[in-house]
Amino acid sequence: MIAIQRRQLTPVERKNLRKGLFFIAPWIIGILVFTLYPVIYSIIFSFSTYSGLKPPIWTGLQNYVRLFSDELVGKTLGNTFFYTALAVPVGIVVAILLALAMNSAVREVAIYRAALYIPSILPLFALSFIFIVLINPKYGLVNYALSFVGVPADTDYLSDPTSAKMVIVALAQLGAGNAALIFLAGLRGIPQTLYDAARIDGASRLSCFFKITLPLLSPIILFNMITGLSSGLQTFLQAFIITKGAPNNGTLFFMYYLYNTAFAHAELGYACALSLVLFLIGLALALVLFVVARRFVHYDLVS
């Protein structure tokens, strides 16, 4: 066997290591105290009955057995998957279109970029209240605009579970400006010579978009799909403000149900079990997405 000799750090390297650890110490402490510690305790409390006021009582797998008989778990998971399956792909398409608009070679492009980005920095709760007014069946501007294409102006979109979820999906698109900036950076990084060579060969703009732009944006698309999946599974605030989970629990998302379980019913142990299940679901979906992404993600300019 060949012995591997470990190289000793020089005094300068040890000094630099100490300096590096000192500068990242706040981050390490933050991760340990505000992330790792709560996660460990959540896992422990998920095996107990805990109200937050009295000491936890160990109950083993009782909370996880309850998950399989809880009808609201299936209902909320279905609502969450429905929202995520629509909001994430639509959000990526909207973000790419916004990025293409931001990348236009016009004199006022800086103004357009600011106008398209501003909605994404507005607080989500404020946008939710604005949306309530916009879709009001009596005086909403959205209802008034849709009346010109034959939709009744007095339509209450929050009275039907499906249309209520679609309202929340539409609201999510106002935050596409953040993803659009990332796509814009990707567009600016694509060499113009690729487009010039394709046009010499007779390729149209549409062909260039599907053969050059989209393949080279695929890593950014994957990144936004992962972040969108994470935020989609944790959707809560929009439903909390706009619908309160109505109608008929049609917008009661999993995170909203978790919130009610923990703070409205003081069942923190069961809520911890729900949070762990949500984490495992998100992890599994992310792994599946990474595996599938190997087929369409291109990290090199020339594949």
Image (cartoon, grey):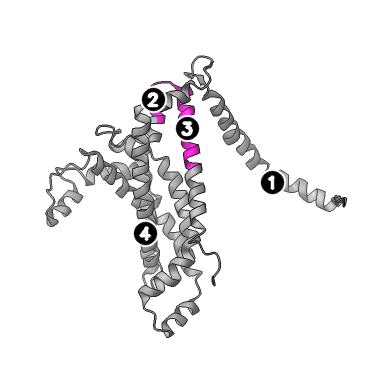
* Three-letter code, disc 2: Ser
Q: CA distance from mark 3 to mark 4?
A: 30 Å
Note whether residue 262 is visible.
Answer: no
Q: How would you rate the neighbour count of disc 2 (Cα within 10 Å): few for under 14, some for 14-19, many for 20 or more?
A: few
Q: Secondary structure at mark 1?
A: helix
Disc on res. 23: 1
Q: List the residue tagged with mark 3.
A: 275
Q: List the residue tagged with mark 4.
A: 93
Q: List the residue tagged with mark 2.
A: 69
Q: Secondary structure at mark 3?
A: helix
Q: CA distance from mark 2 to mark 1?
A: 49 Å
Point out the tag, 1 or 3, that comes first from the N-terminus: 1
| Residue contact between numbered discs 1 and 3, judged by CB atoms under 8 Å | no
> With respect to residue 48, does 111 lie above or below?
below
What residue is at 40 percent from the left and 50 percent from the top?
121
Q: Which residues are magenta?
A: 258-283
Q: Secondary structure at mark 2?
A: helix
Disc on res. 169: none
